[in-house]
Every structure is written in structure tokens, then in C-alpha cells.
């Protein structure tokens, strides 16, 4: 085999494995969320597949002519990569929040294609080893080329493909290219073998494997194309869809991956459906009426459906809103389907909120509302003491920070976040239905709003507003009660913030 062809095969197959590894996160996210466990499962499964595939490829290369096996490896690797899409769509809806679910789904969908494609490198190495004196040179060169292919696969996928194209067409294109490459390689090797009068490299068994692979690729492509997934819009970060509320024709629900993220009433932007969002509204109303200022300045960590920015913009025309939203495609989705029509006093900045907050002026905000999520978890770098200190920097002396936290008993993450916020702010309170603040078996999971300020919190006014709208929430502000709730929970820092491990999920 000519050296350029051998190098290309190793480069392409190694790159394809890493393309699948990156895209696996997007394919699994609608069913198991975007958490550290999800990506740990994917990385672990793919690494195991690479190890197994490389070992088996070496064993096979020593037992049969490797040129006979190489074309089916490409065809079957590409076909099984395409098959991962309908497999996930078939099994994903049955996924639970059990710790091993992501591992099981990743194994079923991605172990086989990653293992098959990883077998290509040792097969090519065996073909190229025509001189034992050059073994080190051949193995080292092809290993380096394989690593280069993997690096290109990572960077091109992460920086270009995910942002430019939906996941399914990319998987089909990569898998289809491998299938076509395998068929072309079989033809090339057959012609080369005939010309050189060497034994044919594509006997009946090889042809059967390749035919099976082609049929699998065609069937899987059809299933992946016509069996639509749960996404209405697939962004670089989320699987998003908007549903109509059957009980409220003007109501729209925004789903991001597994989470019912936002609710917007197209006819009434002051309608706050979710309880924690209504609490945010109570806080903004209380702060706005505190000194007669009709226009509070609010910073929003996360835009989502833009429920709260639109509420503030509508109710307080003199207000200013700075919205830090990670995903620019969500902004467009909100404009198109959720009635977002911002005034000149709403500034939307796309990008990571941690870096975006650095551009917010000191002491410029009356309220900071934290409502950013990746799945059920607040992104870890938005939970730490260092980030909370940045929040404090942007607030005026009597400004208030409110963060929405989702957790289940025993509430380890919620308690850690409260401990963290208390490290920075003098006054802290919790607002939630009473059962959501119980850490034992009699507790119930859900949203809890954590309030914090260096000035005394407006607890009396907030209680009146909660009572006025008939909320069943309790407001806990007594320092002793907060002490008892927090207990020995750790403070989250940039050096130590195991949010995914502390969080207890339940669906």
C-alpha cells in the first residue's frame, strides 16, 4: 500500500472516532442532560473502545491478510456510526436519572463504531511493515498521524461542525464517507492485487461483510433521517423545542434538553407561570418600589425564554436589562417563537456569563438574577465563591442577588451553594415550598430561590407579596435557621466545585 494512502486511512479513521466522541454529547443530551457524568461516560466508553479495537485489530492482522479486512472495517465502522443515531432515539426516551444510564446509552451507541474504526490503525501498520529494521519508524509515524487525525477531528467538530450543522447530518456524512471509502478501497486493492498477481483480498466472506455494512448504512440513514429526534432547533449547546400550553393557547413552553426551562405568555408578558420566576418578579417589584424608583437595573445570568427580561422591560419602561445568554441561537428562537421584542434599554450579550459579567460595571445593578442551567445543574463555574464575588461587585450597596437552584433531598448541592453565597454576602434567605427545604425522605425536590445581599433583605415585603398571590412558599431568613440548614456543607470554589456529584436528580 502506498505510504500516502496508508497515512490517509489512519488519519481519517482516528479523526472519525473523535468526531463521534464530540457529537455523542449532543446526541445523548436530550435524554440524559449535559453533565460531567455524561461526558465522563462518553470519554470512558470511547477510550475503552479504542483500547479494545486496537488490540483486536492487531490480533486480526496477525491471523488473516490485513488488506482483506481493512475495507470491511471502514464500511462497518461507518455504518455502525450512522446506526448510533436511531439507536439513541429508540432507547433514549426510556432513560432514567440512574447514575449508569449515560454509560449504558454511550456503550450501546458508540462502543462498536469506535472499536471497529480503531482496528484500522494496526491493520495498516501490519500492511506497511515490509522491513523489520524500520518497525519503529513505521509505527511511530502512523501513530503520530493517527493522533493528528484525532486532533483535527476534535477541533473541526468543536469549533466548526457543531456550530454550523445539526448533529445528525454530520454523523451521516462522516459514516457515509467511511462506507464509500471502504468500498473504494476494496476496488483499489482488488485491482492492485490483480495487477501484481497476488491473492485476491476480497473473498466471499469479505464481500458479505461489506454488503451487510452497506445495507446497515442505508437502513440507518433512512431511520436517522425520517425518525426525528426531540429537537425542534439544535443549537451548539442545546436541543431546544417550543410547545404550546394546551390549557393556555397563548402560552409557550421552552424545553432545553431534558428540562422544561421557560414559560412565556405571548399575550401577557407579565404572566409568570413558574413559581420561582414569580418569586423573581416579587423581588424585582419589591426593589423597584423600595425607594420609588420605577426603573430597576437588572442583570440576568441566562436568558432562556427571556421571561424575566421581558417582564422587567414591560412593567418598568425606565429599567435597564443586561442579559448574559450563552447561546445566540436561543436569542433568535426567542425572537421568532417566544415574542421577544426588546426595547433599547435591554442589552443582550451572548457568550459565557462568567466572562460576560466582567464587562458589567461596578455597583451598576439593583438586582442580579441567576437562572442558567446545563440540564438540571447550574454550570459549576457559575456557583463558586469567586463568581459570587463578581456578582457582589456589580451590585449596588443595597442590591440583591437571587439564584434559582434545582436539587433533590438530601439537598447537598443546594446547601453547598447557600454556604458559598454566605461567604460573600451578609444576609441570605431561601424561598420555596416547605417540602423542598427538607433534607430527609419526607422532602421533595424542585426549584429553590436563594436570596443574598449585603443590606438587610426586604423579607417583610416579600412575604406580603407571596401571600398576596397565594403562594405556598416559605421564606427562611433567620440566620440560625440558615446555619442549621447549611450544616457542614462545603464552600464551592474555582478549585473545588463538584456540582454534578453533589446534585441529586430525580425524574
Image (tube, rainbow, N blue to C red):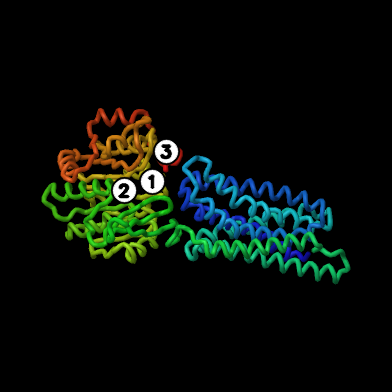
Callout 1 touching callout 2 (CB < 8 Å): yes
Q: Residue at x 42, y 50 (%)?
A: 258
Judge left or right: residue 492 versus residue 310.
Answer: right
Q: Earlier in the sequence, mark 1 or mark 2?
A: 2
Q: Which mark is residue 378?
A: 1
In whole angstroms, how far apart are the C-alphas of marks 1 and 2? 9 Å
Q: Which residue position holds label 3?
A: 504
Image quadrant for the C terminus? Answer: top left
Residue density around tag 2, few if under 14, some if 14–19, many if 20 or more, within 10 Å? many
Is residue 289 in sight in this rendering? yes
- Farthest residue toward the left? 292
What secondary structure is found at the residue carrying circle 2?
A: strand
Q: Which residue position holds label 2?
A: 370
Judge left or right: residue 499 versus residue 187.
Answer: left
Q: Earlier in the sequence, mark 2 or mark 3?
A: 2
What secondary structure is found at the residue carrying circle 1?
A: loop
Q: Earlier in the sequence, mark 3 or mark 1?
A: 1
Amino acid at each position: 500500500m502506498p505510504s500516502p494512502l496508508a497515512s490517509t486511512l489512519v488519519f481519517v479513521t482516528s479523526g472519525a472516532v473523535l468526531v463521534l466522541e464530540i457529537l455523542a454529547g449532543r446526541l445523548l443530551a436530550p435524554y440524559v442532560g449535559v453533565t460531567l457524568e455524561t461526558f465522563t461516560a462518553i470519554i470512558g466508553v470511547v477510550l475503552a473502545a479504542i483500547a479494545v479495537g486496537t488490540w483486536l485489530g492487531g490480533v486480526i492482522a496477525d491471523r488473516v491478510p490485513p488488506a482483506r479486512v481493512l475495507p470491511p472495517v471502514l464500511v462497518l465502522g461507518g455504518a455502525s456510526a450512522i446506526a448510533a443515531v436511531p439507536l439513541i432515539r429508540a432507547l433514549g426516551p426510556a432513560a432514567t436519572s440512574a447514575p449508569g444510564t449515560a454509560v449504558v446509552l454511550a456503550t450501546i451507541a458508540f462502543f462498536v463504531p469506535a472499536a471497529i474504526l480503531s482496528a484500522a490503525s494496526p491493520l495498516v501498520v501490519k500492511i506497511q511493515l515490509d522491513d523489520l529494521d524500520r518497525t519503529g519508524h513505521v509505527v511511530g509515524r502512523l501513530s503520530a498521524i493517527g493522533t493528528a487525525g484525532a486532533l483535527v477531528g476534535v477541533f473541526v467538530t468543536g469549533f466548526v461542525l457543531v456550530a454550523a450543522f445539526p448533529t445528525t447530518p454530520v454523523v451521516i456524512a462522516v459514516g457515509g464517507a467511511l462506507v464509500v471509502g471502504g468500498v473504494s478501497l476494496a476496488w483499489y486493492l482488488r485491482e492492485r492485487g490483480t495487477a501484481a498477481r497476488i491473492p485476491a483480498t476480497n473473498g466471499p466472506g469479505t464481500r458479505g461483510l461489506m454488503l451487510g455494512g452497506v445495507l446497515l448504512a442505508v437502513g440507518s440513514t433512512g431511520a436517522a433521517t425520517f425518525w426525528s429526534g426531540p429537537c425542534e432547533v439544535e443549537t451548539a449547546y442545546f436541543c431546544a423545542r417550543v410547545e404550546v400550553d394546551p390549557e393556555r393557547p397563548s402560552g409557550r413552553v421552552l424545553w432545553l434538553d431534558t428540562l422544561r426551562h421557560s414559560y412565556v405568555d405571548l399575550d401577557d408578558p407579565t404572566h409568570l407561570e413558574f413559581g420561582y420566576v414569580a418569586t423573581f418578579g416579587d423581588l424585582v417589584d419589591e426593589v423597584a418600589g423600595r425607594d420609588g424608583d420605577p426603573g430597576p437595573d437588572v442583570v440576568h445570568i441566562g436568558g432562556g425564554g427571556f421571561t424575566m427580561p421581558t417582564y422587567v422591560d414591560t412593567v418598568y419602561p425606565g429599567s435597564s436589562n443586561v442579559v448574559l445568554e450563552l447561546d445566540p441561537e436561543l436569542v433568535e428562537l426567542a425572537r421568532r417563537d417566544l415574542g421577544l421584542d426588546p426595547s433599547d434599554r435591554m442589552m443582550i450579550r451572548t457568550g459565557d456569563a462568567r466572562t460576560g459579567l466582567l464587562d458589567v460595571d461596578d455597583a451598576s445593578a439593583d438586582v442580579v438574577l441567576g437562572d442558567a442551567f446545563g440540564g438540571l445543574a447550574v454550570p459549576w463555574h457559575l456557583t463558586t465563591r469567586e463568581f459570587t464575588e463578581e456578582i457582589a461587585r456589580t451590585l449596588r450597596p443595597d442590591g440583591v442577588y437571587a439564584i434559582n437552584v434545582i436539587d433533590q433531598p438530601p439537598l447537598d448541592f443546594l446547601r453547598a451553594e447557600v454556604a458559598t453565597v454566605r461567604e460573600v454576602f451578609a444576609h441570605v434567605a431561601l424561598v420555596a415550598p416547605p417540602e423542598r427545604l427538607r433534607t430527609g425522605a419526607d422532602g421533595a425536590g424542585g426549584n429553590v430561590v436563594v436570596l443574598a445581599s449585603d443590606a438587610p433583605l426586604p423579607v417583610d415585603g416579600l412575604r406580603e407579596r407571596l401571600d398576596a398571590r397565594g403562594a405556598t412558599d416559605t421564606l427562611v431568613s433567620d440566620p440560625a435557621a440558615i446555619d442549621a440548614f447549611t450544616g457542614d456543607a462545603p464552600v464551592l470554589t474555582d478549585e473545588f466545585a463538584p456540582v454534578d456529584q453533589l446534585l441529586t436528580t430525580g425524574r
